[in-house]
Image: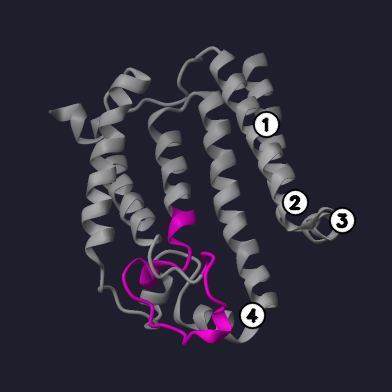
Amino acid sequence: MEGTVQVAVAAAAFVGTHFLLSHPLRAPLVARLGAGGFLGVYSLVAFATLIWVALAYRAAPIQPLLWPVGDGLWAIVTVVMLLASILLMGSLIRNPALPGPPAAAKAVPEARGVFAITRHPMMWAFALWALCHIAVFPDPSNIVVAAAILILALVGAAMQDRKKEALDPDFWRAWEAKTSYWPFAAIAAGRAKLGGFGMHALAGGVVIWLAATWAHLPLAGWAAGIWRWT
């Protein structure tokens, strides 16, 4: 378990420094270093801790899996990863959370496509990726790394809401009223309707899903997704 402990320490450093630099330390560091200087420090710390995680994970021996993984679980994960891929690709266009013109200068849009599912489609794509990798590869070190990504995505999404509410309360609270943090909650509550997916989300999601699952064989040594049955 020593290898898993090393992975856990590295993962904690990666996640912890990200949250510290993104929130409580951001303003004082920007004031002292300027925006460019802060970005340099942030990038250096993020890169260094990520490399630490990768090296620790690579050095950790694979241990006995914590539960059996059969074709049924693989089938569920394959479908969930398609949803994650659609969420990721759909988040790249018309996402109010991404850098762009001041939100106050824009009208609050209707929640369509992936944003009807959740206002944080990119973060939930990463979270679903993490959950899927935990499900089909329950090695302790892998669980630690995937859990770190899961925490970074979902806690980061909640903290993003708080930051956006403070920066532009009128726009973001109106956007929150039309959307949901939890997937499909706004649809279930009648605040949004499922539909309006662009081809960048659907076709792009399918392409990245096929490519990423295919890449498991040459990169990881085992087949994933539909390639397990082809």
Please give the residue where the numbered disc 1 appears in the rendered image.
48
Q: Position of residue 94 (x, y in %)?
A: 40, 70
The amino acid sitting under disc 2 is: Phe
Q: Residue at x 52, y 78 (%)?
A: 176
Looking at the picture, does residue 30 appear above or below residue 134? below
* Residue 226 horizontal/vertical position (percent): 19, 35
Secondary-structure class at tag 2: helix
Residue positioned 23% across, 58% down in the render: 202
**Does residue 75 show up?**
no
Q: Which residue is mark 2?
A: 38
- Above or below residue 89? Residue 220 is above
Q: CA distance from mark 4 to mark 3?
A: 24 Å
What kind of element bears circle 4?
Answer: loop
Mark 4 touches mark 1? (CB < 8 Å):
no
Disc 4 residue type (three-letter) = Asp
Amino acid beneath label 3: Arg
Q: Is residue 154 above or below residue 178?
A: above
Crowding at dot 1, Cα within 10 Å, few <14 / some 14-19 / many 20+, comes out as some
- What residue does disc 4 label? 168
- Cα–Cα gap, marks 3 and 2: 8 Å
Q: CA distance from mark 4 to mark 2?
A: 22 Å
